[in-house]
Image (cartoon, rainbow, N blue to C red):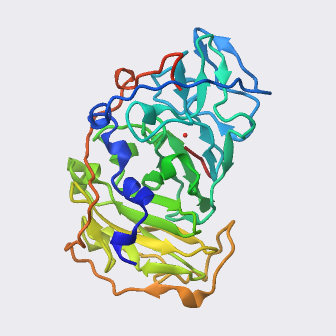
Amino acid sequence: MRLINLSAALLGALSAPSVVAGKQHGHRHNAFEHLRQHLPVQSSTLEKRGGQCQFPTDDPNMVAVTPDAKNAGWAMSPDQECKPGSYCPFACKPGMVMNQWDPDSTYEYPASMNGGLFCNKNGEIEKPFKGKPNCVSGTGSIEAVNKCGSKMSWCQTVLPGNEAMLIPTLVTSSATLAVPGSSYWCSTAAHFYINPPGTGEEGCIWGTESEPIGNWSPYVAGANTEANGQTFVKIGWNPIWEDSGLKSKLPDFGVEIQCPDGGCNGLPCKIDPANGEGNVGSSLSAKGAGGAAFCVVTVQKGSTAQIVAFSSGKGSSGGGDDDDEETESSTAKAEPSTTAEAKVTTSKEPVVSTTEEPSTTAEPTTSALPTTTSSTSTTTTTTT
């Protein structure tokens, strides 16, 4: 697989959209005016309180994010309320993705904020896609596997939404990640920040340079499935972490993409900090903007891949044959003989990449998160 063939959706994830949410999100998109007729939601528990729309309580597939903060469960910054005239994104259960957003929105600001349910001028929730569920299953092609001995949280960014890393996937042993298919909003990919072992759901925040969690975590990952059934999955160093003083202390864990049952191209694809900061073990490694190295694996239709977190220095099971530990998978498995492995290199020399990866340390605030008016017309999961 050559990087030039990567899906456009994953290239978007490779550029870590959430890292620009604070400093640049409000400036990197053109202004976009938008009109939309809204359809009323049916069979939902809707409550009106304090001039804002309340998080639905009758959908078992929806998961509340920081319900005791001002966002009151919506997948929004803790100090942001679901106000009339705005779209309010939400998180879904493990392995599921958000299935509601402004039908006319595009990846331009502020329309890119219009994920979730619409809060009308009366403080009532309206469902953009009438008759469709709020959450649907992802493609099930990627698992997160934790071999570090203590819990870890994988923090998914909210898109469409404010692109903050607010949606937690708690991984104790293994968990299916919410990988969107080609019908997801603007065909975008899922993007995750991988917190260190010992960090729970509370680490899915816009943090500070004082500790490597949330947007300061050392590693990022991304994945999406295309219409032909192929899934692209990526792991990389977080450019924010690399541009901070945190890199003076290397992580005590690494990450690796494995395909125990074959069906993958682009292996090996591994980051072991024991080999040095910024190094990626792959002959297909590349660097995005900000100088952060990454590698990508193509998972064939019907196959599954694992992103394995392991204690640094111990390694994982190597080339992808994980015989000592079984993990769950919700996708059919392919023949082992189809896995292609490339020669490992830890060189910092990159393959040419056209992706750009701006970075920032600023946290998005409500002043940078505009709401739409009544004439205004996405994001996924936690796992155990």
Q: Is residue 308 left or right of residue 350?
A: right
Q: Of all residues shown, which one is farthest toward the right?
A: 43
In the image: residue 284, left or right of residue 116: left
Q: Nearer the viewer, residue 362 or 31?
A: 31
Q: Quadrant of the N terminus?
A: bottom left
Q: Is residue 166 above or below residue 32?
A: below
Quarter-of-image position of residue 20:
top left
Residue at point 52% right, 22% down?
86
Horizontal and vertical percent position of residue 219: 37, 57
Residue 329, horizontal then vertical, whole percent: 67, 68
* Residue 212, visible in the rendered structure: no
Tell how many labels.
0
Taking 3 as reference, is 356 left or right? left
Is residue 354 at least partly visible in the picture?
A: yes
Give the image location of residue 258, x and y in percent: 50, 75
Give 253 or 35, whichever is nearer the viewer: 35
Q: x, y (%) of residue 87?
A: 54, 27
Left or right of 198 on screen, residue 350: left
Say above or below: 331 vs 121.
below
Name the quadrant containing residue 51: top right
Residue located 58% across and 23% down the image? 72
At a point 27% along the width and 52% down the height, the residue shown is 357
Residue 218's quadrant in the figure?
Answer: bottom left
Q: Is residue 193 above or below residue 78?
A: below
Q: Nearer the viewer, residue 14 or 213?
A: 14
